[in-house]
Image (cartoon, rainbow, N blue to C red):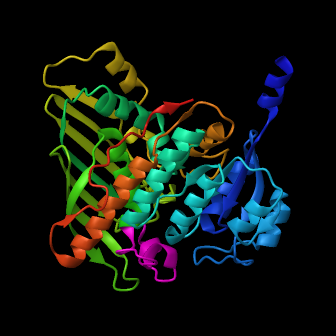
């Protein structure tokens, strides 16, 4: 038994990375290569010379040499090879997420999917159903890389609001995300961030950034969207939405008032020159109190989790949760180290260990349904129904093992 335990403790998570674009080459591949318990066993990329308007990318041949692994032009080829895999990290175009996610689950593999889960509600519903069946029948993990949801602060907020209901029944959420990202969404050469593909209802700040904010809101609040009314301000250069205002109604009667904009001057990924990063705010109002989490994501001392109750007074569990969230952090896009908490949770899942699901398929489905309805509403000028899967509930955020 001791030798079996030693073998298990020494085994690495065998992961194939799908997609070799900007984010894979700048974040996922370097992170995994530095993780002592993970091994990149394959890279899947159909283009031997990946292109990005943001920076220069290495060829797949150079990547294979750098990371010491084979490169395949398709997932089918990788799955047909003799390689033994534990999981897939999917960082490809939005329109390809459904097909690749389904293929990974059918192959018996854990999946870490880049956000958004898909950009098509019907595909999102199908992927959520497949993920639920794979978890139930095979114990497979399906995680979405909404990195903010895996942070200690988000876990504390979810424990207070959704799990322990310390604000009571959530009645209203006011949330915003304002970022210095015009360089990304106002540039038509950044096609993956600005141009609609597949059956997307639109593209821009909604899918690119508000998918993070809404994943946090649905994760913490346990809410299920039903309808949305929205207005977007579009870039004259790229056609992408640069600013979004929306009201989302939920199945429990709650409302979400949302504001998002890429129009903050500067660069959200640079702390130099006084840049504060992305401003994020989420305020949860319930029939027993309110919880607030807001600040600048590159300034830890700019905010913290707060809880106030109508009845007054906090218990020991409240104080412990607040103490674990005494600084502000949201997305984890640090290029150094072994990756964000979401990636580390995925590695744990691949090794058969207890892991935290900060954003699972149900949260992913809620995000897709809400943003798709927002885009449709912005085009039609009317209130739009979030469809399909109107009765889907939120079950993300549990620890599984």
Q: Is the magenta region chiefly helix, strand or loop? A: loop
Image location (x, y in percent) of residue 321: 38, 24
Quarter of the image where one finds residue 265 = bottom left
Query: Does 246 sit left or right of 73 as displayed?
Result: left
Position of residue 12 relative to residue 164, above or below, is below
Residue at point 16%, 19% (across, down): 312
Residues rendered magenta in the picture: 179-205
Question: Which one is nearer the viewer's eye here, 307 or 8?
Answer: 8
Instruction: State whether residue 353 appears in this view.
Output: yes
Which quadrant holds the C terminus? top right
Question: Which one is nearer the viewer's eye here, 307 or 117?
Answer: 117
- All told, the count of numbered labels is 0
Position of residue 173 relative to residue 119, above or below, is above
Residue at point 19%, 29% (across, down): 168
Position of residue 241 relative to residue 75, above or below, is below
Residue at point 47%, 33% (across, down): 152
Quarter of the image where one finds residue 246 = bottom left
Q: Is residue 300 magenta?
A: no
Image location (x, y in percent) of residue 223: 27, 44
Query: Does 257 sit left or right of 356 as displayed?
Result: left
Which quadrant holds the N terminus? top right
Instruction: State whether residue 327 appears in this view.
Output: no
Quarter of the image where one finds residue 107 = bottom right
Image location (x, y in percent) of residue 22: 62, 67
Query: Does 333 sit left or right of 253 as displayed?
Result: right
Extreme front residue here? 137
Residue at point 15%, 72% (across, down): 382
């Amino acid at each position: 038994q001791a030798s079996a335990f030693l073998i298990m403790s020494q085994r690495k998570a065998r992961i194939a990375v799908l997609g070799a674009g900007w984010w894979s080459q700048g974040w996922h591949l370097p992170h995994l290569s530095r993780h002592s318990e993970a091994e990149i066993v394959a890279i899947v990329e159909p283009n031997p010379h990946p292109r990005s308007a943001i920076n220069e990318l290495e060829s797949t041949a150079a990547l294979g040499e750098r990371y010491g692994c084979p490169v395949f032009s398709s997932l089918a080829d990788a799955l047909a090879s003799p390689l033994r895999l534990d999981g897939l990290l999917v960082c490809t175009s939005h329109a390809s997420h459904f097909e690749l996610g389904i293929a990974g689950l059918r192959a018996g593999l854990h999946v870490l999917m880049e956000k958004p889960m898909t950009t098509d509600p019907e595909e999102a519903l199908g992927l959520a159903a497949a993920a639920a069946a794979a978890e139930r029948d095979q114990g497979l993990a399906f995680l979405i890389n909404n990195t903010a949801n895996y942070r200690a602060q988000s876990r504390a907020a979810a424990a207070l609001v959704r799990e322990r209901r310390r604000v009571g029944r959530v009645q209203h959420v006011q949330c915003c995300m304002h970022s210095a990202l015009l360089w990304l969404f106002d540039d038509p050469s950044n096609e993956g961030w600005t141009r609609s593909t597949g059956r997307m209802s639109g593209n821009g700040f909604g899918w690119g950034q508000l998918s993070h904010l809404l994943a946090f809101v649905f994760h913490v609040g346990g809410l299920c969207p039903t309808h949305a009314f929205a207005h977007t301000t579009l870039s004259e250069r790229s056609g992408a939405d640069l600013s979004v205002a929306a009201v989302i109604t939920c199945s429990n009667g709650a409302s979400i008032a949302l504001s998002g904009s890429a129009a903050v001057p500067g660069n959200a990924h640079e702390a130099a020159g006084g840049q504060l990063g992305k401003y994020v705010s989420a305020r949860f109002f319930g029939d027993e109190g309110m919880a607030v989490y807001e600040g600048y994501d590159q300034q830890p001392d700019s905010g913290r989790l707060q809880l106030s109750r109508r009845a007054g007074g906090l218990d020991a569990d409240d104080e412990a949760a607040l103490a674990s969230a005494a600084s502000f952090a949201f997305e984890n896009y640090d290029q150094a180290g072994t990756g964000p908490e979401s990636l580390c949770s995925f590695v744990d899942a691949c090794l058969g260990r207890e892991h935290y699901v900060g954003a699972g398929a149900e949260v992913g489905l809620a995000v897709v349904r809400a943003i798709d309805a927002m885009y449709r509403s912005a085009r039609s000028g009317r209130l739009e129904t979030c469809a399909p899967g109107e009765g889907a509930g939120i079950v993300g955020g549990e620890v599984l093992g």
